[in-house]
Image (cartoon, rainbow, N blue to C red):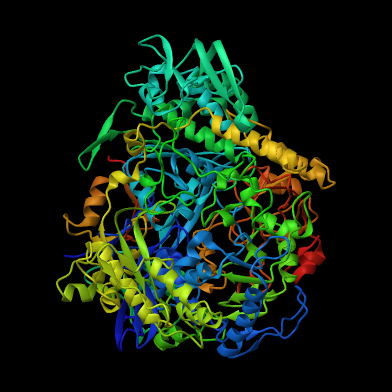
Amino acid sequence: MTKWAIVADLGRCVGCQTCTTACRHANATPPGVQYRKVLDMEVGTFPDVRRVFVPVGCMHCDEPPCRDVCPTTATTKRADGMVMIDYDICIGCGYCIVACPYQARYKVSKPTFAFKDQQTQNERARFDERLLGVAQKCTFCVDRVDYGLANGLTPGVAPEATPACVNSCLSKALTFGDTDNPDSNVSKLLKRYKSFRMHEELGTGPNIHYLWETEDE
Amino acid sequence: MSAAPAGGGGKVEKVQTYCYQCVAGPDLMTVKVVDGVATEIEPNFKAADTHPAEGKVCVKAFGLIQKSYTPHRILTPMKRTNPKKGKDQDPGFVPISWDEAMSTIAERLNTIRAEGLVDGNGYPKVAASFGGAGTPTQYMGSLTAFLSAWGPIDFGFGSGQGVKCYHSEHLYGEFWHRGYVITPDTPRTNYIINCGANHEASGGVCGVYRHAEARGRGAKRIQVEPHLSVTGACSAEWLPIRPKTDAAFLMTLLNVMVHEASRDRLDLEFLRNTTSSPYLIGPDGWYLRDPETNKPLLWDEKTAKAVPHDTAGAVPALEGRFTVAKAVTLGADDERWEHADVEGVTAFTKFVEHVREYTPAWGAKVCDVPEARIRKIANEFLDNACVGQTIEIDGQVMPYRPVAVTLGKTVNNGWGGAECCWARTMLAVLVGALEVPGGTIGTTIRINRPAANRLESFEGCLDGFMEYPFNPTDRDTWKANPVIRNAYKMLVPLVGNSSWSPALGPTQFSYMFLDEPQDQIPRATFPEFLLVYRTNPVISFWDTDRVASVVSRMPFVVCFAHTRDETNHFADILLPDATDLEGMQLIRIGGTKFQEQYWKTQGFALRQPSVKPQGEARDFTDIATDLAVRTGLLEKYNNAINRGSHGVPLKGPNWDFSIPLDKAPTLEEVWDASCRSASAELTGGAESQGLDWWKQNGFRTIPYPETNWFLTPALKAKGLRYELPYQERLTRIGRQLGNRLKEAGITWWDHQLTEYRPLMDWHDFPGYWEQSVVEHGGKVEDFPFWVVTARSMQYAWGSNMHIPLMREVSGNVKGHDGVVMNPEAARKVGVKEGERIVVSSPIGKSVSGRVVLSQGIRPDTILMMSQFDHWATPVAKDFDVPSMNRLTAMTMQLTDATGSGADLSRVAIRKARPDEQGRSGEKGRRA
């Protein structure tokens, strides 16, 4: 089997948001819709303070709460673990947006553009009416992954088959791969280093894994 | 199911080009173009094995598509119709043809040429301001050839230089070890003490990449700064130091290393043989020299006598006092004294005695940090230095010293910057970690030549050090009158006289002296013609209201304009150039460049049009050629191109692609010849691929030896030493400069002369800013906070404040939306998160913004990130986020000897009144 996942090394992430912009480009999302973004978190009290950058987005959960609440079966889970939305079926009710514990879903009801009401050439070229009034979120750049698989490329290794956020990461904090394959890039990282998953106690089985201390165990 | 994102069909092209928006570039990227429209920026995966960060580009590059298509773009040449220039005046710009714009400009320039290039006071009539620390030249095509053909130009009107850069480091770094910008050897270092440098925001793609790799293998960085920056977040420890006390902290580390640690933990061999530590100092403070040769003496332990520093086989004594039978000392202005049976003390002993008073207990008090942490850091530095160990790189065995010290902006400029640089360099010197693998190293040079290879940029001098191109201070050749308005050549010997020096000098003086004529120098005059490109000094300099006032009085201003902004608000002509994704230019890549760009290759990359220029925007090379024709400078211009002033000489040892001198070249002809010459240069003349090949392939490189990253082997190969710790040359030059100024009756530079000392020491640098409060008529207790700033990767050097994507994603990073302050400070002021405060500085200026609470900042300090204070730039003018630029005093008192100031001010804070809530232009922003 295959289970696609992202490993995010918090020791490497610098919060630069390059992944956020790369995702915005790749998916042509409207202003404010950030399938991938990086949180800037602070813990402690002066002078004992830590600040940490945490990439977030759809966790492509094993048991996605968004799917469970979807009244139209628009949200489904592929055999390879990716959680998908069928825009033709979605009615935009927003239950999934509320149900997602990771705040990963967005809904935009009317066209919005970077320069308010002035649509630029690139926005015009990439305007996607299908996304109006429906839920949208990170797809793990499924089109790239599927393209890669169809052409004998390894997702997470070949850039053409890898999510844009991972490709763009300056610090190599993000790695994409198949956790079901023990020899994959992500499996090796998870075996070598300590990791955790966000809100694991909720039983959602999220598939973004966070490396915290990257010194060898 | 979820389908592929829209807009992927049609004719798809992947265009290779580069991003050099900031000094941390260039980075290689790909633009995805669908049916002629740029839709996505991607890394250049083809450069994964060539570029030091695998062909990635940072967040700023992703803004380039909105930059191309912004509806706010200036699409035609424009002229001002309102002759009145003021912040409150509508310029009344109206579109004009290129012919009208260029005719108007040429008419002005031709009048100047006819009447003389220099005015009656000796100042060039044409001035130019280019920002971005040199990055504009990567976008201005062959304009550099036109500038070269023109003649004298005042390049000294700064837009951040001195106050926004790493000024002390540029000058002292290049003087001591040919390091204009200084970094760790990050791939090998294990321990970094970092005073305020924000590598993760301003170190560029390569910096981020290298430091992430270093953290991944367990390297430790101690971040020393008043607020917890992005870089602090990515560091092992944060030491929240009191602003402007870094020099004290570093000197305290020196104290621990020489007064608490045993000597064998230092690199005694390096100190003895690669530095001036064993040089003997006479009672008058000058080197004791051999009476015959004038060479400095050291004490040879083998023969127990003083011998010239380069005596073969001598075993220099590192420490002690020795009696020298005969010696001479050389002072300023050819003063010479003869000595007999004179006591000489080694420079190292002088240094040890000098830092004795800088104990950890003292430093803890000055810096407001725990004494135990200072001691711990000093010892960890020693523990990690690996003194005695070596490493082999490309077959060359070199010292391995994986410890480094780096300095950030504000630490590194203005008063105290020189002391920080000296102490930082001495920390490296003590353990032999200067310019060796793992240690503290320089990237590039800008004052010395050749710029492309710092290892070939020096010869030795009599004293056994690297020669340095000081501006002269002797009686015969000192420049008593400024050659440009900022007087860099007259006042700052260290800044030299390279093509970069005018813009490195005290660039604020270009503005200040217009309204504050200084005694005994010709009164500064307004240039008759000011050219501005990729810079916005009215918003990005210090005391920005004052800069605006000066620019508003410039007789004729031409701005290359992407959108309207605060500087081109005062322009007479706006010109739209084909910018990042539209223009063409071949640039050098590789080797070692600014910030953390260390390559293992070198070569060229082509910026080629990904898309057609918007509107009537023109390629810069076409604009420059047109100017050359209209001003009758075509032959000189073509000559300059053939010489390579645009980046690549067109003639080499066995190739010649020179363009004819008498014909106006087309854009393609200039760059085709350049591409052919670049191909020839990289292949020793064997190949000559032209523009078509480079468009297809994007870049080409040949190997660059990694061993060239380090200067020390080249220094030792020439039998030279670093002039550290003792600064005889600087002392002499300072004395001479003092003599010249005194002879000229100039007293206004007296305070700056105090920076010329043989051993740098601590002064109450924070007190200088407190004194500034008093000088402006205030009371220090009324201004109880410090305001500092920090770089932001989303914006740094990018001129991209008008790009909504940057605004959007920078909102994910704390500090971009307001004034960061500690909750304890907020309690004192009586404000909560999100409430509006008014921040006032001693110069009588105020700004207001919303409170962003953070535990990651000292309670006595507030942070205003970046340079948000726009009132004309589209998008940015609606940010409602304050900048400290308006608050910072631009004064002679706060200008150091290198000509720089610091982003720092004492401020008062109060809660905004109800009528000051929300942004309402100036009314809401002023107290």
Residue B16 seen by the camera:
no
In the rendered image, the quadrant that contains the N terminus of chain B is bottom left
What residue do we see at 22% from left, 43% from top?
B394
B206 or B839: nearer the viewer: B206
Q: Position of residue A128 (x, y in %)?
A: 40, 86
Q: Nearer the viewer, residue A199 or A108?
A: A108
Residue B100 position in % (x across, y down):
61, 89
- Report which quarter residue B522 is drawn in: bottom right
Q: Is residue B109 left or right of residue B29?
A: right
Tell me if residue B272 comes above or below residue B902 in the rendering.
Answer: above
- Above or below, A57 against B789 in this view is below
Front residue of B616/A89: it is B616
Which residue occupies the foreground of this view, B304 or B262?
B304
| Image location (x, y in percent) of residue B875 | 60, 74
* Residue, far right: B777
On screen, residue A42 versus residue B558, left or right, reads: left
- Name the side, left or right, on which B285 lies relative to A127: right
Residue B53 visible (yes or no): yes
Above or below residue B766? Residue B280 is: above
User: For this view, does B702 lie left or right of residue A136?
Assistant: left
- When asked about the image quadrant of residue B655, the answer is bottom left
Q: Is residue B666 above or below residue A97?
A: below
Residue at horizontal 49 percent and vertical 56 percent from the top: A40
| Number of numbered discs overlaid on the protein picture | 0
Expressed as whole percent of the image width and height from the top left, the position of residue B447 reads 49, 50
**The C terminus of chain B is located in which quarter?**
bottom right
